[in-house]
Each structure stands twice: as C-alpha cells, then as structure tokens.
C-alpha cells in the first residue's frame, strides 16, 4: 500500500500508532487495541522500503540516519490535508523498524478527550511549575496542548514551547506562540530553556525534564515569575516529587526540595484505562499545592501527599483511585479493570464493597 494512502486511512480510523516491524503484519493501534491490517508478515526489505518512504516524505536524509551511531531517530512530518505524524525509526534484530504516531490536524477538544475542568484550570496560574505525568502514550501531550490552547485564547503574552518533536501546532491567537523542535531548531532541552529565558517568555512548555540540569534550570525559570509546564514519566504526585529530588546529588537535594516546595503549583498524573465499550478513557490524579503539601515536601514527608490530596477535594483535588471509582460508578469502566489500574488496590476494593458496586 502506498504510504500516503496508508497514513490517510490511519487518520480516518483514528489510529494512534502504526507499527512497521519485520516478522509482523502491518499493524496499528486504535482505542487501546492492536489491529493487524492483513495476515502477511513484513520482511526486512519491506520495512526498509517503508522507512525510506517516510524519510522521503519528511524530506530527511536516509543516508544520514544510517551514519548515526545509536541507529535511532525521532522526527515529525506533515501531509497537507491529512495530518501530522511523529516517527521513530530504529533497528531491531538486524532490520529496520518504524513506529508512527498519528497527530490529526487541529488541536484536541478537551471535552472529547475527557479532560476535566480542574486540569484545564492550570491555565489560570500566573507563575510557577505545573507538571503533567504518566507513562508513555498516556495522553500527556494532548492534555498540555489543551491547556496551552486555553492560555493562547485567554491572555496575552509570549508562549514558548520546546518539544521533541513538535506534535500539535499552535496558531498565534491572543498570545505570540514560538515553537522550537529539539534537535532540529536547537540541540537540547537545556539549551532551549536557557535561550528561552532571553526571549521575554510568559509561559514555557518544556517537553520533558530529562536530567537534573534541565530540572534545575526549569525550577529556576519558574522562580523567575514564568509559568512553566513540563512532563515526567512518573506515576502519582508523591512519586513525581521523589523522582525530581532523587535526580540531584545528595548535597543538592535539600536545596531543590526547598525550591520545589515554593515554585510547584500543580501535578496532574494520568493514565488511559480501557472502557466497557472497547475504547479508552483517561483517569486523572490532580494535586494543587497548598500550605500542608508545601510543608510535606519541605519536611521530607512525601509519603503523606496521597492523604493530603484525598483531603483536598474541596480545592478540586482527586486521587487516582477516586477517579477510577467515579468511572466505575458511572458505568464506564469495569470494576476489575479499575482495580488493575489502581494505586491502592485493597482500599479501592473495600470501597467498592461499602458502596455496593
């Protein structure tokens, strides 16, 4: 099948990812389910032809890829009238492999994506650090795109995004939006962040906090009255705080703990959960900073953050298990599935029993 036709078909069926791997039929993922397009396994020659076609469409050098020491390359490309795509090309068992993430044109609708108003309210902060966390493929980029779009329509200022690669395209609305792709426009996240501080930013989106140097620069930027959004591949607010602090040498951990307690505004953790009708729906843990949580971070009592979130429902907070309980109570998710995705399985199971679910 011609690549352009395949990509158009994938957009039409709302696929999230396309898998081109030798020994496997051409496959895609939609609504959390993997689907084979046919029964014919791809050969190494087939996968190389696919990869060459993607490099040609993206106007990139295949020979340059072959010269890379790590045999791995990420990039994005667009097909006019069809959509945007993010490609990862890699080697496996001596052959080339390819995974393409499908990004439809336009920005996601937060209602259709089931993103709650409490999460979108993160656009109301004027300064500080907001983190969206969760495993790969859990919808973090989609959530951030919705928040940035709300900012872009509700205030004036300069929004700078740094992404690897750029997924959603934001047009200039009431804000000026500058989008930089790593490593196409600038070499690293750290360099992009340091450069951004000289570009009169009001809001910064840092695609990922990958190392303690980037984390340190991001925290400093948030201290300087910028509003900064970023992501981590962590589960839960408490685990996120610990991950950030543990990234630093022991001699610097007390200082970063103090800084984090002052600049952090919110942590949103999410995961995609299979529904009864065969689709997926996001479940969210939402933590907004208050005096109690700031003290817990400063005093190295992060293990108590879950309890503080549970007690903060009046402020719009919710635990992951609360979100899962609500999805079961609404008949969207099966109880056993919710238990598989829960943080405190026994406590959630007991609550189901008490509530008669």
Image (spheres, helix red, strand yellow):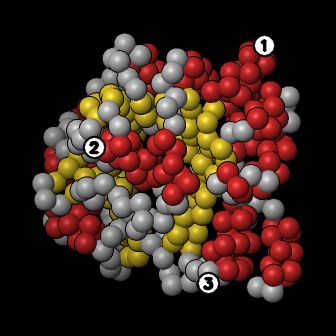
- Foreground: 288 or 220? 288
- Please name whichever residue, 315 or 130, is drawn nearer the observer in this view of the structure: 315
Location of mark 3 (residue):
331
* Mark nearer the viewer, 2 or 1: 2
The spot of residue 326 in percent (x, y) is 66, 73
Q: CA distance from mark 2 to mark 1?
A: 40 Å
1 or 3: tag closer to the N-terminus: 1
Residue at figure coordinates x 27%, y 59% from the top left? 104
What kind of element bears circle 3? loop
Check the image and report above or below for 228 versus 348: above
Q: Are marks 2 and 1 in contact (CB under 8 Å)?
A: no
Locate residue 356, reporting x and y percent: 81, 86
Asked if residue 247 can be seen in this view, the reply is: no
Q: Quadrant of residue 233?
A: top right
The percent coordinates of residue 318 (x first, y second) are 69, 57
- 211 relative to 56 in the view: left or right: right
Residue 105 falls in image quadrant:
bottom left
Q: Are marks 1 and 3 in contact (CB under 8 Å)?
A: no
* Mark identifier at residue 170: 2
Kindly report the distance in space between the C-alpha atoms of the residues bearing marks 1 and 3: 50 Å
Residue receiving disc 1: 251
């Amino acid at each position: 099948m011609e690549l352009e036709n395949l990509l158009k078909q994938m957009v039409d069926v709302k696929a999230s990812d396309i898998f081109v791997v030798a020994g496997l039929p051409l496959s895609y993922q939609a609504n959390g389910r993997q689907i084979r397009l046919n029964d014919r396994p791809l050969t190494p020659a087939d996968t190389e032809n696919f990869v060459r076609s993607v490099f040609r469409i993206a106007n990139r050098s295949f020979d340059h890829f072959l010269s890379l020491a790590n045999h791995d390359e990420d990039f994005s490309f667009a097909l006019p009238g069809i959509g945007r795509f993010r490609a990862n090309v890699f080697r496996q068992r001596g052959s080339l492999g390819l995974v393409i993430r499908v990004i439809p044109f336009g920005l996601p609708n937060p209602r259709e994506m089931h993103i709650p108003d409490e999460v979108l309210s993160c656009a109301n902060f004027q300064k500080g650090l907001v983190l969206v966390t969760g495993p790969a493929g859990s919808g973090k980029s989609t959530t951030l795109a919705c928040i940035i779009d709300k900012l872009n329509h509700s205030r004036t200022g300069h929004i700078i995004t740094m992404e690897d690669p750029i997924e959603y395209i934001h047009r200039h609305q009431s804000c000026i939006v500058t989008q930089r792709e790593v490593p196409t426009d600038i070499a690293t996240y750290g360099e992009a962040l340091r450069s951004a501080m000289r570009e009169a930013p009001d809001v910064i989106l840092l695609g990922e906090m990958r190392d303690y140097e980037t984390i340190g620069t991001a925290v400093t930027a948030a201290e300087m009255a910028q509003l900064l959004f970023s992501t981590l591949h962590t589960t839960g607010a408490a685990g996120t705080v610990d991950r950030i602090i543990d990234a630093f040498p022991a001699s610097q951990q007390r200082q970063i703990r103090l800084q984090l307690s002052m600049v952090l505004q919110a942590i949103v953790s999410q995961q995609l959960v299979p529904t009864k009708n065969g689709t997926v729906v996001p479940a969210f843990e939402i933590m907004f900073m208050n005096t109690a949580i700031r003290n817990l971070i400063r005093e190295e009592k992060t293990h108590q953050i879950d309890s503080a979130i549970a007690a903060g429902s009046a402020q719009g907070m919710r635990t992951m298990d609360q979100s899962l309980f609500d999805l079961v109570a609404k008949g969207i998710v099966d109880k056993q599935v919710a238990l598989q995705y829960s943080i405190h399985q026994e406590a959630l199971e007991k609550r189901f029993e008490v509530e008669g679910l």
